[in-house]
Image (cartoon, rainbow, N blue to C red):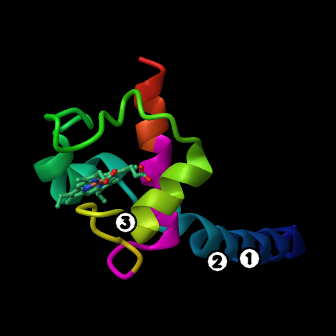
Amino acid sequence: MRKVYVTFFALALMIGSCSKKTSAPTASINAEKIFANDCARCHGPQGVKDERTPNLQTIDLDKAGLIHGITYGKNHMPAWEDKLSAVEISALADLIISWHNK
Ligand code: HEC
């Protein structure tokens, strides 16, 4: 019986340390919060503001296109390459895509 406990404990430790490494970055990312902090001042709270910025709810870009646009910027759109991680940029692209279906 004791052996079972020890094995279970070792297993739980292993799983615990694995999932920590893989899920921590995504779990802590709140794309809505990043958008509100970094993007909304130009794009509006839901990606629609005025004629100076494209309407992100109807923009004709797929996920790769969105990631490219956010990462490298375009004209007055700043590049986010150095400010946000690839995972954060990907989460922002997902957020923008989720608005498309509304
Ligand atoms: C300083 C104002 C400003 C900020 C801050 C800003 N944008 Fe933009 N963004 C723009 C402008 C202006 C354009 C239009 C660029 C063009 O087409 O010339 C644009 C374009 C885009 C596009 C389309 C890019 C393309 O390739 O057509 C996406 C996607 C986008 N922004 C997402 C974001 C996200 C996500 C953030 C926050 C991380 C953000 N923007 C922050 C001004 C801004």
The quadrant where ligand 1 appears is bottom left
Mark 2 vs mark 3: give the one in front: 3
Residue numbers of the magenta segment:
82-94
Which residue is the site of mark 2? 17
- Real-space Cα separation, disc 1 to disc 2, in angstroms: 5 Å
Is there CB contact under 8 Å for labels 2 and 3? no
Which residue is the site of mark 1? 14
- Real-space Cα separation, disc 1 to disc 3, in angstroms: 41 Å
The picture quadrant where one finds residue 15 is: bottom right
Q: Name the amino acid type tagged 2.
A: Ser
Q: Is mark 2 within 8 Å of ligand 1?
A: no
Quadrant of image for the C terminus: top left
Does label 2 or label 3 sit earlier along the sequence?
2
| Residue at image coords 46%, 31% | 98
Crowd band around label 1 with a 10 angstrom C-alpha radius: few (<14), some (14–19), many (20+) = few
Residue 85 percent coordinates (x, y) = 45, 73
Which residue is the site of mark 3? 73
| Residue 85 located left or right of residue 55 | right
Does label 1 or label 3 sit earlier along the sequence?
1
Mark 1 vs mark 3: give the one in front: 3
**Element class at badge 3:** loop
Q: Is residue 90 visible?
A: no
Residue 101 vertical placement versus 52 (above, below) = above
Q: Name the amino acid type tagged 3.
A: Gly
Q: Most extreme residue toward the bottom, as rendered?
A: 82
Which numbered tag is attached to residue 62?
Answer: none
Crowd band around label 3 with a 10 angstrom C-alpha radius: few (<14), some (14–19), many (20+) = some
Residue 58 vertical placement versus 69 (above, below) = above
**Element class at badge 2:** helix
* Predominant secondary structure, magenta span: helix
